[in-house]
Amino acid sequence: MKTRTTLLSILLLVCSVVMAQAQGKEKLQQYFNSAATEAKSVADPNQKREILTNSLSKMSKALVVVEAMSSVSETDKAGIQRFKASLQEKQDALLGVNGQSRVADEKLNDYANYLVQDMEQADTVVTISLITLLLIIIIIILLF
Amino acid sequence: MSIACKVFLSAIVAAFLTSCASTPRLYQTAAQTGPPRYSLIFMIHGDANYVFHDTVGIAHYADEEALAKAHVVARANPAGEVFIFHDKPLSKTLFFFKRRDGDFYYYRNGQLVATHSYWRDEGEGSARFAVHGALYHQFRAHDSSVATWPTRRMLLYFGHEIPEVDGLHYDASYPDSTLTVSKFTNDLLAFSDRNAPPIASDQSKYFDLIVMSTCFNGTPHSVAALAPHTRYVIASPTNLHLSYLDIAAFEHLENTLANNDVAAFARFAARAAFQKLSASVQTVVSVALYDVSKTVQYTQSVDAAYRRSLTTIATAPTLTLAHCDCTEQAPFNSPFMHEGVEVLYRPAKFGRDANKPNHSGWSCWKNGP
């Protein structure tokens, strides 16, 4: 019985590692897609803006935590910095700060789509390794 | 032996036999309506993350969608032959038996004639398209007679940006293998045939048109590397959303290419793809058509400066370098840059470049985000 349990655990571990490897960037995309879908589902523009801002803010905080880890490579840190800058720009546009024009209320659904589509072609994320991407996802789940 | 054991053993034998099957499956003989007038090769890369979401939030797989559209184009070309290659992630049956990671489909005169599954790493040495080229030459319709060659040959590639340096990790299943623009263009020779009649005055060119449905391959370096193979290139000098360039324009080439005017057809195809993408995404859309006989003056004039950028990227990978319009960087801003390039451009609806009114059609590198 004990052997069977051990074998089953090893099998599950192997399966989760394989699945996680396949889903590094995909998980990140899903995160923004969920936020965009939620934002589009509410009618109140203030709520839409808050949902989108919160999702960007959470991601930025997770990036700060991961960037501070000593195990993260210099290449990944450079990638994280670019990713953070890109997220900051998007937050600025939502809030209309740092020289950015505030996204109009009636354009918030389009902006939610823009966030998702920009992430799907973001070459900044491509430069971040799979392990670091997974760390970012884990941090978001655990801390925020 | 228990039934469970028998089932298990049968599954292993079936998995083993499936992974070893290597004979192309033939469906039918193509309708004899004369030799194909058009030849299309679709190369669809699927061995990476190709997920994108529509505006309702539903996930799509870019490679699967491109494959489905390629089949539609193939069936809608009664006067052509179509080769479709789908490079998939490596997977295993029962954790041990490697499954073939490529699917090939061959259509002639609008009918599916053969299918075959292949391993992408079979064939000679490190040549990326060895197996693709071998299948192409095995199935193509023409014989040694010049009269049987398709009059127009085109290749369409779908995938992520093909890097100009480094090139590691392009294939998720083969992290140690590399793909760069140089390797891609060198390995395109796998499709060539020195007996082929010239498609233009320059006998070395094998294709009339190469479509790069990728991000950022509209660069001086990439277009110059493709130039020995083709007369025209359609590519994007900016990001390209994963819903890709639409290919509906390639249906019924017997109508759109009836007068054999490749330039006019390429212009039509680029415009159709641009309009489709502009209507569906909020991000930047740019589609450029390059007449490579006319762009050579520009690509040669900036070649040295561009190579210096590539050296910088190769030697300092953590340095923050970003793509930019070539007009933004002095060494690349040349009076020749508008020769031979037609650009269709719509800025992103939001973000830093939302107010950028136009694009030169050429992507270069700059410091900074």
Image (tube, coloured by chain):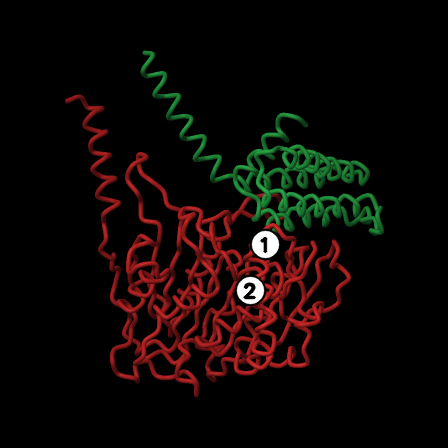
Question: According to the colouring, which chain is red?
Answer: B
Q: Residue B49, percent across and down?
A: 50, 47
Question: According to the colouring, which chain is green?
Answer: A
Dot placed on the residue nearer the N-terminal end, 1 or 2: 2
Left or right: B113 in relation to B87: left
Q: Please, what is the three-letter code of the amino acid marked with disc 1? A: Ala
Residue at 64% x, 31% y: name it. A140
Instruction: Decide: few, some or many residues near mark 1? Use Cα within 10 Å; few <14, some 14-19, many ≥20.
Output: few
Chain of the residue that carries numbered disc 2 in the rendered image? B
Distance (Cα) linking label 1 and label 2: 21 Å
Instruction: Decide: few, some or many residues near mark 2? Use Cα within 10 Å; few <14, some 14-19, many ≥20.
Output: many
Give the answer, above or below, for where B296 lies relative to A133: below
Q: Residue B270, percent across and down?
A: 57, 70
Q: Return the residue at label 1.
A: B316
**Circle 1: element type:** loop
Say which quarter of the image contains residue A14: top left
**Circle 2: element type:** loop
Q: Residue A36, percent across and down?
A: 68, 41
Circle 1 or circle 2, nearest the eye: 1
Looking at the rendered image, the quarter that the C terminus of chain A falls into is top right
Q: Please, what is the three-letter code of the amino acid marked with disc 2? A: Asn
Chain of the residue that carries numbered disc 1 in the rendered image? B
Residue at 60% x, 46% y: name it. A125
Q: Return the residue at label 2.
A: B217
Residue at 36% x, 18% y: name it. A6
Outermost residue on the bottom side: it is B201
Outermost residue on the front side: it is B315
